[in-house]
Every structure is written in C-alpha cells, then in structure tokens.
C-alpha cells in the first residue's frame, strides 16, 4: 500500500488501499459432480456440495486480496447465517469489511449453482443484499482507494442507474475504474452502457456477453465495437483464452494455460482479479492478460469461487510452467 499525503480534511498521512470492490453480496450453494444438467420434472444425483461466499464482486475482491492487493468491500448483508458465511469468506483473505452494512431485517441473497461435466447452471434469489444500494451510496472518500471495481452490471438496476455519476466522481479523485457485465436475461444490452463505459477504464465481459452487447457472433468485432464506446474491452473466451481491444483500437490476445477443469464458478472473477493485480502493479497490458489467464486457470482446478483462491505463488508458477499441473 502506498501512502497519501494529508490534506485540509485530514492530518498527517493516511493509508491508501489498492482496490475497492462494491456491489452485490450473497452466498453460493455449489452442487457438483453431476453428469448432466437438470431436466424439468426429473431428479439428478450429484456427488458433493459447498456453501461459500458468492457474488462476482466478492469473488474478485477475495482473489485480489489473496494475490496480495490491499482490498476493501462495500455492500450490504443480513445478520443471518448466510450473512455470517459471507463475512467470514471475505475476512478469510484479509479483505477490509468495515464498509459493509448489516441489518437483522435483511435476508442475504443466495445463488444455487449446479456444476456438471463441461457446463453449469445457476439460479439466484436476490434477498435484500443484491442490488441493495444506489451507486451514489458508495463511500469513495472513506474507502480512499486507487481503483474501484464493480460487477454484475446487468444484475443490479439500482446501481446501474447512476453508476456513470459514481465513476465520474471516482476519476476526479484520481481513481481508475473497471466493470464486469454479467448476463442480462432481459436482453437490454445497451441500457445505460454507453455512458457507463465512457468513464470505465476496463470492461470485462465474457465472449457471450460481448457478442450480445455488440449484436455479432464475431468476438473480435464485438471487442472493437465495445472499445469504440470509450473503454478498454477485455473479453474472456474460456478455453480459447482472452483478448483485449484498447480504446485506440489495438488488439492483444493471450492463449490459455493448460489446466484440468474441476469447476468453473468464479473463473472469470479470478481472471479480473489477476488482471487488476498486474495492472495496479504497473505491468503491461499483455502481462495483465497473461496474469489474469493464470489466475483463472488456477481457479477452475477447485470447487467454489472463494473456497480456495489462487495465491501469487501459484499464479506465478503457472505462468512459468504453462500449466496448473503439480499445484
């Protein structure tokens, strides 16, 4: 962590965090070991289940902290059992939770994830902690961070409505910004997105999301379309790797690392965290892509998004050896 010199509002020096993540909080119930996906009217049998901290924003925050960034989180939780599971998940990796608001009257959100061979399906109940605040509620001054990341853009209409105002304010404070998309089941892909991306430094959709936003089935064309809206488009393409189209139109690609996929929950969030770690440590954009790919590769070797986050040593080993074998 670097130090920021005191100003007229403070005395002396204050600690500046690397990363502020703000957004939805919930727990994931991950059901794994299925050989096929559920079919209406039928029951299928799996092998295991895990209850852990969920949410795209929280997954990214925990992985970033596990890699070594100083991170804090803003969001809302109930004082129920699920809320306690979520708090313990964040604190396990040293995430600063002082900005999290809790209330005994709130129900913590829940996502059930069914993981089968080569596929997964998710169902979410918002409770009172997903899409739980207005973007302008985020306490940027109190957080005092270098970068702000938010996720599940299409999942949170309350946040989405005034996110551009929040990011404009963040940038006037010297912060950099990033955003992950999430799937929009209603298909309103450009609702507010143009204004939001004009003040977003890095946008992290996956291939399906990027193509839906751009109205094309060509991922490079999609990345160029999104970048032309004023951001650096970083598209996650799963087993095909990742590509980045800068605001200026330069395209970079990074191949995937060899890995054995056990479960994919949180893989994209782990990529985001790895990319942001590298970026905030001053690495080149090409190195950021490769670092993100390595973090994602480690993530898929384990069940659950935050049950065993990648460490810096593991990510560096994968980058050196080109594979997750031996971790």
Image (tube, helix red, strand yellow):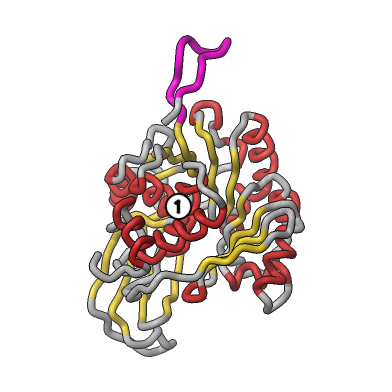
Residue 209, given in percent of the width and then of the height, sits at: 61, 68
Residue 253, given in percent of the width and then of the height, sits at: 58, 66
Q: Residue at x 66, y 60 (%)?
A: 245
In terms of secondary structure, where does tag 1 sit? Answer: helix
- Compared to 314, does 207 lie above or below? below
Q: Residue at x 49, y 39 (%)?
A: 20
Residue 124, given in percent of the width and then of the height, sits at: 45, 64
Q: Quadrant of residue 167?
A: top right
Q: Quadrant of residue 42?
A: bottom left
Q: Quadrant of residue 97?
A: top left
- Crowdedness of circle 1 by 10 Å Cα count: few (<14), some, many (20+)? many
Looking at the image, which is closer to me, 286 or 26? 286
Q: Residue furthest front?
A: 320
Residue 306 in sight in this render: no
Residue 222 in sight in this render: yes
Q: Residue at x 33, y 48 (%)?
A: 66
Say which residue label 1 marks. Answer: 273
Q: Is residue 40 magenta?
A: no
Q: Which residues are magenta?
A: 3-16
On screen, residue 222 versus residue 56, left or right, reads: right
- Compared to 315, does 48 lie above or below? below
Q: Residue at x 28, y 57 (%)?
A: 308
Residue 1, given in percent of the width and then of the height, sits at: 41, 31
The quadrant of the rendering that contains the C terminus is bottom left
């Amino acid at each position: 962590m670097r130090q920021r010199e005191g100003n007229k509002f403070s005395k002396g020096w204050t600690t500046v965090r690397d990363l502020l993540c703000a957004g939805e909080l919930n727990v994931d119930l991950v059901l794994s070991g299925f050989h096929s996906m559920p079919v209406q009217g039928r029951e299928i049998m799996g092998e295991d289940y895990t209850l852990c901290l969920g949410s795209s924003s929280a997954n990214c925050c925990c992985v970033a902290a596990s890699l070594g960034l100083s991170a804090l989180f803003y969001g809302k939780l109930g004082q129920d059992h699920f809320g306690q599971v979520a708090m313990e998940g964040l604190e396990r990796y040293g995430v600063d939770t002082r900005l999290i608001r809790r209330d005994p009257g709130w129900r913590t959100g829940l996502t059930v994830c069914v993981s089968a061979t080569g596929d997964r399906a998710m169902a979410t109940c918002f409770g009172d902690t997903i899409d739980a605040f207005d973007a302008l509620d985020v306490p940027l001054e109190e957080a005092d961070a270098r970068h702000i990341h938010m996720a599940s853009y299409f999942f949170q209409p309350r946040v989405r409505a005034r996110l551009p105002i929040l990011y404009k304010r963040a940038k006037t404070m010297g912060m950099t910004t990033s955003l992950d998309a999430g799937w929009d089941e209603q298909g309103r892909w450009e609702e507010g997105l143009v204004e939001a991306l004009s003040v977003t430094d890095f946008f992290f959709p996956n291939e399906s999301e990027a193509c839906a936003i751009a109205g094309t089935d060509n991922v490079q064309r999609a990345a160029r379309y999104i970048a032309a809206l004023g951001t650096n488009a970083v598209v996650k393409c799963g087993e095909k790797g990742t590509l980045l189209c800068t605001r200026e139109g330069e395209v970079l690609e990074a191949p995937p690392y060899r890995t054995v996929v056990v479960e994919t929950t949180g893989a994209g969030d782990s990529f985001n965290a790895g990319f942001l770690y590298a970026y905030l440590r001053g690495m080149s954009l090409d190195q950021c892509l490769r670092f993100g790919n390595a973090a994602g590769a480690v993530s898929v070797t384990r069940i659950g998004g935050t049950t065993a986050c990648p460490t810096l040593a593991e990510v560096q080993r994968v980058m050196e050896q080109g594979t997750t074998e031996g971790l």
